[in-house]
Image: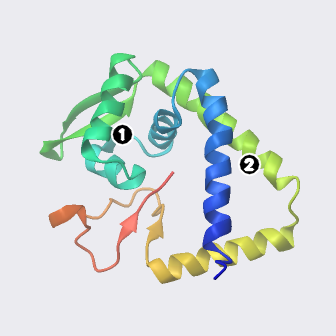
Amino acid sequence: MTLRILSPIHKATRQIGLHLADKTTELGVSTDEAHLLSYLESYGPAPIYELQRVLGHRPSTLTGLLDRLEGRELVLRERNPEDGRSYLVSLTLSGSRLAHRVTRLVAQFEAAVLEGVDERALDGFRRVMEAIGGVTRIQVRPPRGRRAPTVGRGGVPDSAERKVRTA
């Protein structure tokens, strides 16, 4: 059985990852570190549970990422003033500069891809992505200013519809 949507998405994800790995290495970070920095540039400061949910890392893996980035003074962990049991992660000034470089690198990659795609193909791609969103019922990037849903047992949001912000 040939998967007409998921196999090409998986292949493209792998190609993008390998391409960006070469570029992020030149910046002195891994792709996972770059993804975290880029996410924080757009959505930070962010609670650790949100980073875990968005990035999909195990807690120990995320802790290692944060330890390395904090050791290089790229991020800062501080107690969350809204919930004293959790921490917020934010970019330092040097982390913000590096995150901006990562974001610019990703924007250049996307621009290069879009050079080979016309509006009709892009509209079709959007429809496929919307259909995936409809089946999964996961809202990607809720509007700015909206709080992320509260998280219940097992890290699952308390709302009936799961809402996850991704980078």
Q: Secondary structure at mark 1?
A: loop
Query: How far across and down, in percent of the image, does residue 141 sit?
Result: 48, 61
**Front one among 105 and 143:** 105
Residue in the image at 59% along x and 81% along y: 131
Q: Is residue 151 visible?
A: no
Report which quarter residue 152 is drawn in. bottom left
Give the colouring mode of the picture.
Answer: rainbow
**Residue 110 shows which numbered tag?**
2
Q: Secondary structure at mark 2?
A: helix
The residue that mark 1 highlights is 45
In the picture shown, does residue 150 fall above or below 79? Answer: below
Of the image marks 2 and 1, the number of the one nearer the N terminus? 1
| Amino acid type shown at disc 2 | Glu
Query: Mark 2 or mark 1: which is in front?
Result: 2
In the picture shown, does residue 95 fall above or below 137? Answer: above
Q: Is residue 120 left or right of residue 83?
A: right
Query: How far across and down, in percent of the image, does residue 50 sit?
Result: 32, 51
In the picture shown, does residue 26 fall above or below 155? Answer: above
Residue that lies at the very extreme toward the left in this rendered image: 85
Tag 2 near tag 1, CB within 8 Å: no
Residue in the image at 26% along x and 67% along y: 157
Q: Is residue 41 visible?
A: yes
**Front one among 41 and 15:** 15
Report which quarter residue 100 is drawn in. top right
Q: Is residue 53 left or right of residue 143?
A: left
Query: How far across and down, in percent of the image, does residue 120 sit?
Result: 85, 74
Q: Quadrant of the N terminus?
A: bottom right
**Residue 7 shows which numbered tag?**
none
Query: How far across and down, in percent of the image, does residue 10 sit?
Result: 60, 61
Report which quarter residue 36 is drawn in. top left
| Amino acid type shown at disc 1 | Pro
Residue in the image at 38% along x and 53% along y: 56
